[in-house]
Each structure stands twice: as structure tokens, then as C-alpha cells.
Image (cartoon, helix red, strand yellow):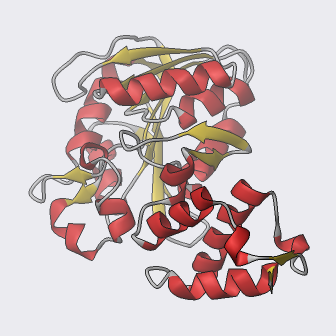
């Protein structure tokens, strides 16, 4: 017999891909999912030989670096659970910050909003549910990602209209927008070798990487498109690579956007850029 606390400590030590606190959090998440046990149950005693096989199998997957959200098929975002799979990026805390910024800065009702590169659709779904009667659209190049986004919208009862579209080659499907938002691919390919294997091996490259020689590719194309689909005074919001804040700001200024601002995330890294169309 072993108590909950000891089991968490023992298993966390086996997750050597992660730092100790993250490893502990992952083990606790797995145990809560399969056994309904949480940290408050730390004195609960377990017989390891009676642990369900599916829990042991999932722990083995975790040790190999597979993200827990993909193991469980879902991940949290802004207080809700979103389905995820190998075709979508896992929703992240930084993107929650971006969504919160948009909600806070745009309290008016009836806004028209487009999210480009939507993936799980965590951005447009949350905006649809948290803002006042918006009309929300979302695009992605990946059919599989769009199917996942649609399932999430249906499960969470959110009104989002989806379009399959390649931002690099297709015209945007809607115009007269108040808000254009995107968390596009922004990691230069050369950084791939420095990244955690649970990202590189399990999340879609299409949604992560940009050519080394043109890291601002998506920002430039989206911002150029924004000039024809945003209303006067319409706003554009980007999630960015921490090293490209000034470059994205300069790009938007060159394209005649106003009020361009680089915003840091809770970890003090340049993570968002916002601007408006005069």
C-alpha cells in the first residue's frame, strides 16, 4: 500500500523530461482524471497492483513525452474543456491572456470577429461565449483542425462560423470586421532542435513553424489582408514569438496601422501585439 502523496512523488521522479513541479502537476492531473483523486486526498491509500491498466498505460505515454492533453483528449482553456488531438495545437496559458485582453478592451455589443488559424477554436469559441452578442468567424487551412474546432463549438454551445482557407493564398472569407485575431505559426525552423520533444513530436508542424528566412510571413500577410477587411477603427491582435516584438510592431507601423503596442505576458516576455486601422 502507498498513499497518494507518495505515489505522486514516486511517479513524478520518473518523468525526467519535466522539471519537478511540472512533473508533479502532470501526475496529479492523470490521477484525478482516472481515479477522481486530487491533492486534498494526499493521505488516501492505494494498492499499486490494483491501479487500472489504462492509468498505467497513460503514465507510460506520459513518460515518453506525449502531452497529457493529447493522452486525455482534452485540455482546459479559460475555464472550459476543449477537445484536442494531433491535428491541433494544445491551448496554452499565453493564448488565454490574449483572449482576456480582447474581452477586456472590447466591451461593446455586436462586434464582428475573425480568428485566423483557429485549431481547436479555443479563441473564437471563448470570445463568442464571453463577449456581448458578437458575430464570430474562424478559418484554418487544415480540414482536420476545423472538424475539431466545429466539435468544440457544438459541445460548448458557441456560435462560430468556420471556413477552410489558406491565408497565404486565399482571400479572407468575410469583411467589415471589428476585430482580427491570430496566433499564427511563428517559430523559426532552426529553433526546432531546442524545443521540448512533447511539442515537436506530437503537435502539428503546420501550426508551429515558419521559414527561417521569413519569420514574419504570417503577420505580414494577415496584416496586409486586415487593411481591406477591417472597418475603420477595427483592431488587430497577434500572439507573437518573444524575440519578434519590435519586428512585428515595425511591420504594422510600415503598413500604416496606428496605436501599435507590444504587450508582455505574465512571464514578462513580449507575447502580443495590438493595433488598430485608422
Can residue 272 be spotted in the picture?
yes
| Residue 82 screen position, x and y as percent | 60, 38
Q: Please identify the quadrant where the N terminus is shown.
A: bottom right
Q: Which is nearer the eye, 146 or 118?
A: 146
| Residue 155 screen position, x and y as percent | 65, 23
Q: Is residue 121 above or below residue 60?
A: above
| Residue 70 screen position, x and y as percent | 48, 50
Task: Name the residue: 71% across, 40% down.
Answer: 80
| Residue 108 screen position, x and y as percent | 72, 23
Left or right of 214, for residue 48: right
Q: Please identify the quadrant where the C terminus is shown.
A: top left
Task: Name the residue: 42% across, 35% down.
Answer: 119
Can residue 179 be spotted in the picture?
no
Numbered disc total: 0
Task: Name the residue: 58% across, 56% down.
Answer: 54
Q: Residue furthest front?
A: 49
**Occupied quadrant, residue 83:** top right
Q: Which is nearer the eye, 195 or 254?
A: 195
Q: Which is nearer the eye, 125 or 259?
A: 125
Q: Which is nearer the eye, 240 or 73?
A: 73
Task: Name the residue: 82% across, 64% down.
Answer: 37
Amino acid at each position: 500500500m502507498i498513499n497518494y502523496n507518495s505515489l505522486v512523488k514516486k511517479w513524478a521522479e520518473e518523468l525526467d523530461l519535466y522539471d519537478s513541479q511540472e512533473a508533479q502537476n502532470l501526475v496529479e492531473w492523470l490521477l484525478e482524471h482516472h481515479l477522481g483523486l486530487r491533492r486534498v486526498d494526499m493521505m488516501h491509500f492505494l494498492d499499486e497492483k490494483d491501479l487500472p491498466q489504462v492509468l498505467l498505460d497513460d503514465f507510460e505515454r506520459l513518460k515518453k513525452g506525449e502531452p497529457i492533453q493529447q493522452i486525455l483528449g482534452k485540455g482546459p482553456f479559460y475555464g472550459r474543456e476543449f477537445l484536442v488531438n494531433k491535428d491541433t495545437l494544445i491551448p496554452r496559458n499565453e493564448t488565454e491572456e490574449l483572449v482576456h485582453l480582447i474581452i477586456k478592451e472590447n466591451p461593446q455589443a455586436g462586434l464582428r470577429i475573425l480568428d485566423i488559424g483557429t485549431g481547436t477554436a479555443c479563441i473564437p469559441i471563448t470570445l463568442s461565449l464571453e463577449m456581448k452578442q458578437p458575430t464570430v468567424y474562424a478559418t484554418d487551412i487544415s480540414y482536420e483542425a476545423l472538424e475539431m474546432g466545429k466539435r468544440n463549438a457544438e459541445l460548448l454551445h458557441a456560435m462560430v462560423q468556420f471556413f477552410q482557407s489558406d491565408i497565404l493564398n486565399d482571400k479572407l472569407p468575410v469583411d467589415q470586421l471589428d476585430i482580427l485575431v491570430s496566433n499564427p505559426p511563428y517559430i523559426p525552423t532552426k529553433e526546432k532542435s531546442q524545443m521540448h520533444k512533447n511539442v515537436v513530436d506530437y503537435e502539428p508542424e503546420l501550426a508551429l513553424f515558419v521559414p527561417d528566412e521569413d519569420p514574419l510571413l504570417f503577420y505580414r500577410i494577415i496584416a496586409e489582408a486586415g487593411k481591406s477587411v477591417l472597418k475603420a477603427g477595427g483592431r488587430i491582435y497577434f500572439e507573437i514569438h518573444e524575440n519578434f516584438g519590435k519586428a512585428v510592431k515595425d511591420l504594422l507601423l510600415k503598413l500604416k496601422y496606428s496605436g501599435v503596442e507590444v504587450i508582455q505576458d505574465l512571464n514578462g516576455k513580449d507575447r502580443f501585439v495590438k493595433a488598430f486601422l485608422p
